[in-house]
Amino acid sequence: MKKRTLIIIGIVAVIAITAILALKPFSKKEAVVNFNTIKVEKGNISNTVTATGTIQAIKTVNVGTQVSGIILHIYVDFNDHVKQGQLLAKLDETPLRTQLAQSQSAVDQAVSQLHFQESTYNRLKVLYDKQLIAQTDYDQALYNFENARAALANAKSALDRAQVNLAYATITSPIDGVVLNRAIEEGQTVAASFSTPTLFTIVNDLTQIEVQTSVDEADIGKIIDGQRVEFTVDAYSDMKFEGTVSQVRLQPVTTNNVVTYVVILNAPNPDKKLMPGMTASATIYVEEKTNTLLLSGKAVRFTPDQAYLMKMFAKMKSSGSMPKMPGAPSGGLSQNIPTGQGMPSPGMMPGATNTDSKIKTVWVKDDKMGLHPDMIKIGIDNGSSVEVLTGLKEGDEVIVSTGDNASETTTKKTNNGPPGFPF
């Protein structure tokens, strides 16, 4: 009984193997290619340049002193609001007043000397006119008179300088603003012998600030005055501040063989949240459009499989349904398909011979042929998306890649298999 069962199983296995081998020549596999598409939609697109910089006040003044002395009084402190001409500090005036008194005494002495020499000159001039004295005596009197007059002018200049130095002992604010820094204390001695020491740093109204950013030389050609800017600071990481480009400076800055240029950004600061010295990360919008036709950049870079193109164009040519594309010569696309081996790539499609880099070829979904090429003109290209100027309309489905199941195959039965064959 067992032997008979084994014989039956063996016969069934042989019949099955024979049937499979007999059916294989009567079937063929046909590749099914699927494509991933994306629709043309309206949206916003922009090209940007990023830069980092430091927030500063639009106007900063370092207040110093031109005379040496001891700080007698300080009338302002950090963050105080000051007006132009307001008293900030006062130096000890004792040595300056002493110098002023000495200068005044020198002036008085020069005046007396001038009066004496003038009287002497006038007497000798009368005698000289009557030829009663020698020429030498007259010349000496004239010299003494003119010398006394010059000495008086010199003494008056020294007096004026002493008065100015006394005025320098009173330090006032040159602008309306805020005291950003105070570098002195009462009782401190300041020396102005070689350089003017900085006593206070005053910035103007902080409701308007500027950002000094560094832009790489590769991007500086895209920056122009008036472009919109968005920037953030670490203190308010969840907030974006807006401004505009106000100046592109021509002076290059070279650091470790890297050339950058300073770009000044102006921004309002009504809440005074932005403080001088903060580091800002800025995004400069060199190009931007709103509510325009957009297409994924993958669609512009997509190229169908060469074998698929050969098959598709062969069907189109045999059916006489070759499309007429913009820029193609009369006779349609068929005149551009070579008769030899190989198929034209998208870059060789009609219209692509235009040297305009804005002319691109995309592949649009077609219910009849599967897909067909279209020539489009693009505007802004930021890498991930492109702006469509002409060639497509909103809602068009454009192919961006081959589907994941492109390698799958399906088996179709032929009509010449054995009739009634159970497999």
Image (tube, helix red, strand yellow):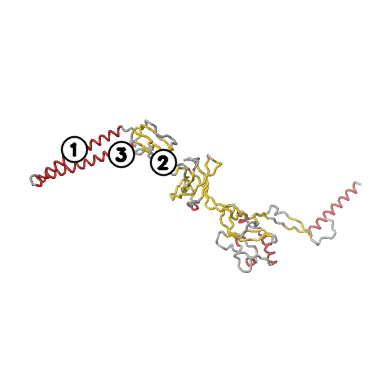
For label 1, the residue is 112
Q: Secondary structure at mark 3?
A: helix
Quarter of the image that includes the C terminus = bottom right
Q: Are marks 1 and 2 in contact (CB under 8 Å)?
A: no
Alpha carbon distance from label 1 to label 2? 47 Å
Observer-side mark, 2 or 3, equals 2
- Amino acid of disc 3: Val
For label 2, the residue is 176
Q: Residue at x 20, y 37 (%)?
A: 109
Q: Secondary structure at mark 2?
A: loop
Count residues near mark 1 (Cα–Cα under 10 Å), then give few for <14, some for 14-19, many for 20+.
Answer: few
**Position in image of residue 156 (x %, y %):** 24, 40
The quadrant holding residue 90 is: top left
Q: Pick whichever, 200 or 420, lies toward us.
A: 200
Count residues near mark 3 (Cα–Cα under 10 Å), then give few for <14, some for 14-19, many for 20+.
Answer: some
For label 3, the residue is 164
Q: Secondary structure at mark 1?
A: helix
Alpha carbon distance from label 1 to label 3? 25 Å
Q: Residue at x 75, y 57 (%)?
A: 29
- Amino acid of disc 1: Ser
